[in-house]
């Protein structure tokens, strides 16, 4: 079985169909840990998992003719406070789907426009930061 490649992925967000993203960051989760000191055993502390927290996901894309759609989608959270579904799919070198991360309850919380510099020749990029209530990983 071939591994998934970090450069072969698609992002599908309700409202941002057929959008091209070049980078995904922050797909992660961690448990908060509560410590409980046991009476009579001064050398031992129990560590128990409590709340599960999910990191925000950042999506980066080049500024292009579709960038106005990103702005409209970002601003729409003011009027439609419904969380949306999202999906990140990873492929191997032969473009066979390896893993799908389905994001639950997605909504945008931040937008960053491009940094412009007339002395350089880099691509202008924009970034969306998304909050979500969790994700489910499935094969393919």
Image: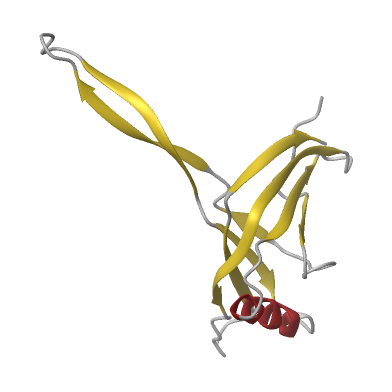
Taking the view exactly as shown, the residue that stands out farthest to the top is: 40
Q: Is residue 76 left or right of residue 2?
A: left
Front-lying residue, 66 or 1: 66
- Residue 73: % across, % down: 69, 77
Q: Is residue 88 visible?
A: yes
What residue is drawn where x is 64% and y is 80%? 79
Q: Is residue 50 left or right of residue 83?
A: left
Instruction: Give the color scheme: rainbow, by chain, secondary structure or one colour.
Output: secondary structure
* Residue 48 drawn at (x, y percent): 35, 25
Residue drawn 63% across and 81% down?
Answer: 75
**26 relative to 3 in the view: left or right:** left
**What residue lies at 68% left-to-right and 69% top-to-bottom?**
61
Work out whether residue 122 can be spotted.
Answer: no
Percent x, y of residue 40? 10, 9
**Looking at the picture, does residue 123 appear above or below residue 26?**
below
Q: Which quadrant of the figure contains the C terminus?
A: top right
**Whole-percent x, y for residue 107 in the image:** 61, 65
- Identify the image quadrant of the N terminus: top right
Front in this rendered view, residue 96 or 47: 47
- Residue 24 is left or right of residue 3, and the answer is left
């Amino acid at each position: 079985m071939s591994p998934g490649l970090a450069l072969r992925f698609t992002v599908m967000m309700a409202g941002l169909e057929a959008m091209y993203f070049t980078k995904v960051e922050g797909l992660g989760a961690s448990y908060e840990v509560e410590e409980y000191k046991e009476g009579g055993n001064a050398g031992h502390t129990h560590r128990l998992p409590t709340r599960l927290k999910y990191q925000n996901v950042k999506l980066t894309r080049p500024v292009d003719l579709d960038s106005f759609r990103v702005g409209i989608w970002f601003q729409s959270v003011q009027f439609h406070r419904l969380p949306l579904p999202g999906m990140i799919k990873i492929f191997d070198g032969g473009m066979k789907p390896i893993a799908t991360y389905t994001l639950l309850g997605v909504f945008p919380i931040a937008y960053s426009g491009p940094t412009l510099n007339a002395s350089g020749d880099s691509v202008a990029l924009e970034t969306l930061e998304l909050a979500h209530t969790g994700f489910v990983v499935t094969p393919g």
